[in-house]
Image (cartoon, rainbow, N blue to C red):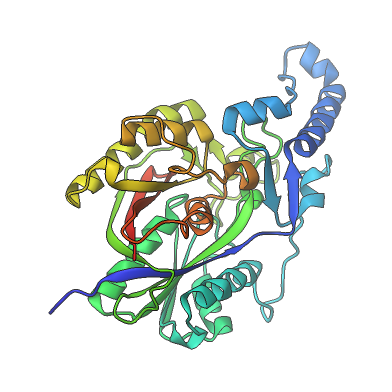
Amino acid sequence: MTTKKAVISGTGLFTPDSSISNDELVESFNTWSQQYNKDNEQAIAAGEIEPQPESNAEFILKASGIRSRYVMDKEGILDPERMRPRIPERSNEEPSIQCEMALKAANQALDSAGRLPQDVDMVIVACSNMQRPYPAVAVEVQHHLGAGGFGYDMNVACSSATFGLQAAVSAIESGSASCVLMVNPEICTGHLNFRDRDSHFIFGDACTAVVVEAEDKARLNNAFRVLGTKTWTGFSSNIRNNFGFLNHCDESGIGQKDKLFVQNGRKVFKEVCPKVAEHIQQHLQELELQPDALSRMWLHQANLSMNQLISKKVLGRVPEATEAPVILDEYANTSSAGSIIAFHKHSQDLDPGDKGVICSFGAGYSVGSVVVERI
């Protein structure tokens, strides 16, 4: 039996209406920090607790390359007495917030692919921040979209989208699905500690969607042929979020901080960058391609310095800005959605035969890559 070839035939992007600049975020953080230090002045003077440092926009830009981020709730995040988004719980009869985000991105992706919801026979919701254990958000999206077949959720942290694409491609190649919708509704701000100077600026919210089909069935005017997928994981606690129904913090609040996003940034940079570059190089070798065959690298949008180092290691030179496009400055880190936002915004200018790699990396550790060719 001949293996079917999979193509990416459409993409979609939902961007929240609200955006927070570095200056706005810093003003909120410093207001809280100053009040904390004032309220705890005696304990700080006695050496019982450490004072809270202040942040600044220049530090954020230098540390990350981020200038702003889109968020589902701006008011709650910037309130110095709250510093977390207000996202009201919905009734079980209403579409969930992640489902609502997914539907907006999905419909855009289906329009791009020239497909109707009923053409979809597999839905994957792949993201790092799920709002519930079950029922699967993917099945909810399937229901409200009017798709057939089946759906499931998956979480590989920031690599969820590339792992989701690998699963979609495998389903097409095996014949278990004919049209797969892979969606990444990320509400990262709900898991971010906005009172931690070293990470309060990192994340934003967004949702991406990708349609994957068999090449012989797809409309190919916007399509990219998938030449190969490659995934890897290796356990590390250097990026971690311990929130879950089995490990809520107790009434005293002990353990509160590690129920939100925490990371050892220096170790992550040192350990992940070479692994990602090696992963992409090995993937290209397996496909009998040289690095100079790549016209574009759509990398996970976590940190500008990481992306610059990875692309330089892969190509053996400093890349042109168009070769490794950045959306990080506008969107911040949107976890699994980042590399897909870059692909969505910076792919249609490529010529037939041009090749590129979608690559994401994150907690786990995890690395996923998808090598594509413009049809």
- Furthest toward the front, the residue is 351
Position in image of residue 261 (x %, y %):
57, 42
Residue drawn at x 75%, y 54% is 18
Q: Which of 47 and 10 is in front in this view?
A: 10
In the image, is residue 265 above or below residue 258?
above
Residue 169 image position (x, y, % from top left): 31, 68
Quadrant of the frame with the N terminus: bottom left
The percent coordinates of residue 12 (x first, y second) are 54, 66
Q: Nearer the viewer, residue 78 or 4?
A: 4
Task: Mark yes or no: residue 82 visible.
Answer: no
- Nearer the observer, 228 or 76: 228
**Image quadrant of residue 308?**
top left
> Where does residue 216 sit, x and y in percent of width and height?
29, 80
Side of 77 where 200 appears, left or right: left
Name the quadrant of the C terminus: bottom left
Taking the spot 44% from the left edge, 30% from the top edge, the residue there is 269
